[in-house]
Amino acid sequence: MMQQGKDYYNKAMDLVSLPLEESPWKYSYESAAAFIDPADTVLEIACGTGRFAKKLQLKGHASENYFGIDFSDVRIKEAKRYVPDFVFKATDAFDLDQLLYVRLGWFDTFVALEFLEHIENDLEFLDLVPKDSKIIASVPNFNTVDHVRYFPALSSVLGRYGKTIKIERTITRQIMDKPRFKVFIIKGIKC
Ligand SMILES: C[S@@+](CC[C@H](N)C(=O)[O-])C[C@H]1O[C@@H](n2cnc3c(N)ncnc32)[C@H](O)[C@@H]1O
């Protein structure tokens, strides 16, 4: 249970290479996508192999309204192969405020699925997200070698992020077809 560098994610490609319809996270992607309008200008942080981007594309999201970043160049390469019309870039999430279109205020929606539990400085990272932006995030209720924390119940998610994000909606979804493994999806506005 510790924070991992990009070399780890470059090698851990098995589950994340499954197509969207076979992905263990397909139900949580579905719930997160329900919080996004096709006209939203989306920056997806830690977008991985683009499976959520594919979900948005299938829902009719315009390619010019999506930009995905992840520090794993191997995952970004796979995302570009899987969703060729969408734009992805190998970038560290902590360089968020250096991205030109973030500085210009172009994105109204920031998505971070299964990311905040992977980094020690999750609250510092959230501070980089512009105030009043829409945020959609998901975190799990279980531990793995690459998590630095997990959330036994929705109340622990609200306790950790409720001061940084004005949380408006939550959804709890089972993943991996096993009732014990759950993901909490939150939608809110960055304070
Ligand atoms: C569990 S995966 C989630 C991927 C994707 N969001 C999804 O739900 O399919 C965590 C992702 O965080 C990325 N990641 C971890 N630390 C990062 C950082 N500092 N900057 C950018 N990406 C990072 C990893 O490369 C990995 O793709």
Image: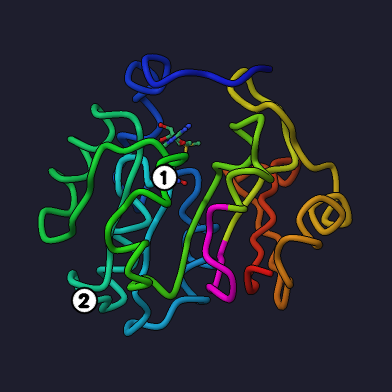
Q: Quadrant of ligand 1?
A: top left
User: Residue 39 lies in magenta, yes or no?
Assistant: no
Q: Where does label 1 land, which residue?
A: 23
Q: Residue at x 69, y 26 (%)?
A: 148
In the image, residue 10 above or below residue 135: above
Residue at the spot of label 2: 62
> Is the distance from the Cβ of mark 1 to the nearest ligand 1 atom less than 8 Å?
yes
Q: Position of residue 3 (x, y in %)?
A: 59, 21
102 left or right, relative to 115: left
User: Would residue 131 be counted in the magenta stretch?
Assistant: yes
When the figure is inspected, residue 118 is found, relative to residue 45, above or below; the finding is: above
Q: Earlier in the sequence, mark 2 or mark 1?
A: 1
Return the x and y of residue 72 as percentages of the image width and height: 32, 29
| Of marks 2 and 1, the one in the foreground | 2
Local SS, label 1: loop
Please give the name of the residue rendered at 61% of the width and 42% of the height, measured from the top-left corner. 116
Give, as a single range, the part of the protein colored magenta: 128-136
Residue beneath the point at 60% across and 32% down: 119
Q: Quadrant of residue 62?
A: bottom left
Q: Is residue 68 above or below residue 140?
A: below
Q: Amino acid at mark 1?
A: Ser
Mark 1 Cα within 10 Å, few/some/many (few <14, many 20+)? some
Task: Identify residue type, mark 2.
Answer: Ala
Q: In what element is the residue under mark 2?
A: loop
> Where is residue 14 shown, x and y percent of the image?
36, 25
Question: Residue 155, how many percent across, how many down?
Answer: 88, 56
